[in-house]
Amino acid sequence: MNKITTTNINRKDGQAKVTGIATYAAEHQIPNLVHGYLITASIASGKIKSVNTQTAEKYPGVIAIFTHKNAPKISKPSNNFINSKIYEARLPLADDTIHYAGQIIGLVVAETFEQAKAAAHLVKVEYTSQKPILDPQKVTLKNAPSMFGEDLKFAKGSFATGNSTDAMAGAAAKITATYKTATELHAPMEPHAIIAQWQNSNSLTVYEPTQWVGGSQRTYSELFGLAPEQVRIITPFLGGGFGSKAFPWPHAILCAAAARKLQRPLKVVLSRRQMTANAGHRSQTEQTISLAAKTDGSLQGIEHTAKSYTSPVDVFAEPCTGITPAMYATPNLRTSQQMGVMNIGTPTFMRAPGENPGLYALESAMDELAWELGIDPVELRLKNETKEHQSRGLPFSAKHFAECLQVGAKQFGWENRTQKPRSLSRDGKLIGWGMAASTFPGLRSSASVKVRLLADGTAHVLTSGNDMGTGAYTIVASTAANALGLPVEKVRVELGDSLFPNGGMAGGSQMTASLIPAVMTACEEVLKTAQAKTAQEAFTSLRQSQRAAFEATGSSAPGEEAKKWAFQSWGAHFCEISLDEEIGRLQVTRWVSVMNIGKVMNAKTAASQVRGAVIMGIGHALMEDCQFDPNIGYPVVYDLATYHYPTHADIPRIDVSFVGEPDLNFNSAGVRGVGEIGITGVSPAIANAVYHATGKRIRELPITPDKLI
Ligand code: MOS
């Protein structure tokens, strides 16, 4: 334990999860429940000519069938991130137009799931079909719009300073390269699912995995013309979200609308097959980077352009270039982001949106430049470190990037690296070492927490903020235990219910930085209310006065600090790969990650976050690729077996350590969050190791065996 780590305890919700006590959305037992099964489009572009539901309606158990002909009533939400946000601006069953294969075109409701599914297959749909646009090379590209409203200009991904064209022309050393990444699926363990239950027509309860309980509450209230208090969201556990469970998708909106129409509690669970098409993905990208440098390695210019693809019904550009001005100091910088439209489902946020594919390109390019100049890649990064965020013009707070590089290099034994490609081998296999930088912004939002001290000597912490598997239960409990001077076993945490104070969003790696200061404040407040210095004193006074509980609410919110500082977390990955070149078999054999995330609330769960992210990054680098059928446009991925991602046998020991100091400019706990940073820089570290092993620069992910033979 050191100055940046508070505790190192086991996962508070671990036992509930491994014993099956933890209840996920679709597992809630609701009396009188009926089941819905979605009908999805089997063409990618065109119109519905006719829908025949006659046979299906007669099927045993069928209660109702909804199509665009009898769509249940839904109001258009403001969809602006503040009042409400839905993933796909077009409302489900809005009309007869098909924009992508897998688009929801109907819902069958029946007494059982099996009946609903069987009847759904009896619905006959005829289409007028036109050739879908599925080839990115044939798409017209436009400058990407801002995803967060026009005031947040940089979200467009365009920025320029100096004159990068001149810098490129006059450079002693220059590299230009184009990098491609594949379409990826979030593939959470828990599928998308919802139970919607109405108490007559003006009170709705939603059981749904959502990363943003408060946001979902407001969004459903706008969709159905209710006040937020008339909507209750219950989501105590999520089986992973990775960005795909922050707002309602069309299936969930349709489920809630159909449940209101029928006045029966209704459950809709997406099949894995359906999830590949209509519940988000990370767009494929194509990025071109040019770097210009002096012979000593100091960067004279960076140019970074990115292309990604959205659906016809909403706008989402994978913001690859957003991170570039934060990475390396250069007087001349130009970034731009372009977007095209294809007949595919709407892409969305996926763990480190932008940073992950963006750093694959930038950190590969930095490695290419290092080889070109004959400079060690760690040295090249140290040399070009920037003290300020170049597009925001603010100094970084508590930045320890150099330490990440230095400590990582030492732990890995980087000084023993050979200076030539194809110069290391072991047991007949080529060995390669690679490294890359890692980064993610420090974000926070407002959050409130209620703490109760009970006469039985326990503390109870409640907030709508939740835990998608990240460790929030654990750090909320340990923070309250520390603040109140109680053993962690005496602290009970309840999360993910909109009846509790609004705890903010589990997205953008901001839950910890939002929630922890609020937990600290709430604990101080409850002791004040009890007029006690410690929880023990408060318990004594409860027993003496025969009161049941002391209770207080604490809140925290971002302040003026974001005008003075840029908050950003940093890291470095070092890895070793082995390659059997004859069969293209690549194995990642060693991994070291060093992260600077401000205060580490709990060493164990924080390191787990980084390990999970490295594993996900190995999938991104080597396996994950969602292809669309060029004729029908449906993803050629059927389930978790046909979407290739890593298993235990693909993963080496992953050594994770943390450096730096608490970032007290950011919040009272000094914590910046750790959900996403770990995946960034993983794929370039591997691609750079592949170059060291083979002399081949792979500029297209995933690095599958065919690219290595
Ligand atoms: Mo994250 S992609 O903001 O859940």
Image: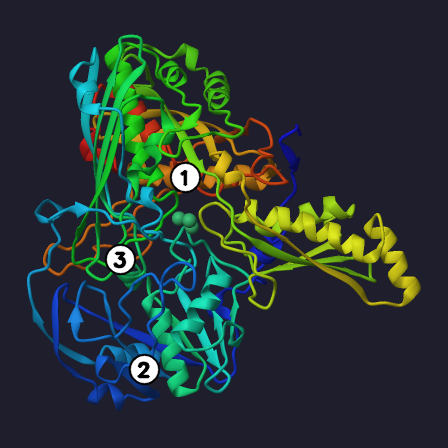
In primary-sequence order, the first of circles 2 and 3 is 2
607 or 561, nearer to the observer: 561
- Give coordinates of residue 694: x percent, y percent: 24, 20
Amino acid under label 2?
Answer: Pro
Q: Alpha carbon of mark 2 to alpha carbon of mark 3: how far?
A: 22 Å
Task: Report the residue marked by disc 3.
Answer: 346
- Image quarter where the C terminus lies is top left
The residue shown at (37%, 60%) is: 80
User: Residue 701 in the image: x percent, y percent?
Assistant: 24, 37
* Camera-side mark, 1 or 3: 3
Compare marks 1 and 3 and give the one earlier in the sequence. Answer: 3
Do we see residue 421 in this rendering? no
- Of marks 2 and 1, the one in the foreground: 2
- The label on residue 429 is none
Q: Which residue is mark 2?
A: 72
Q: Where in the figure is residue 156, as x and y percent of width and height?
A: 28, 44
Is disc 3 placed on a helix, strand or loop?
loop
Above or below residue 241? Residue 303 is: above
Q: Is residue 303 left or right of residue 677?
A: left
Residue at image mark 1: 615
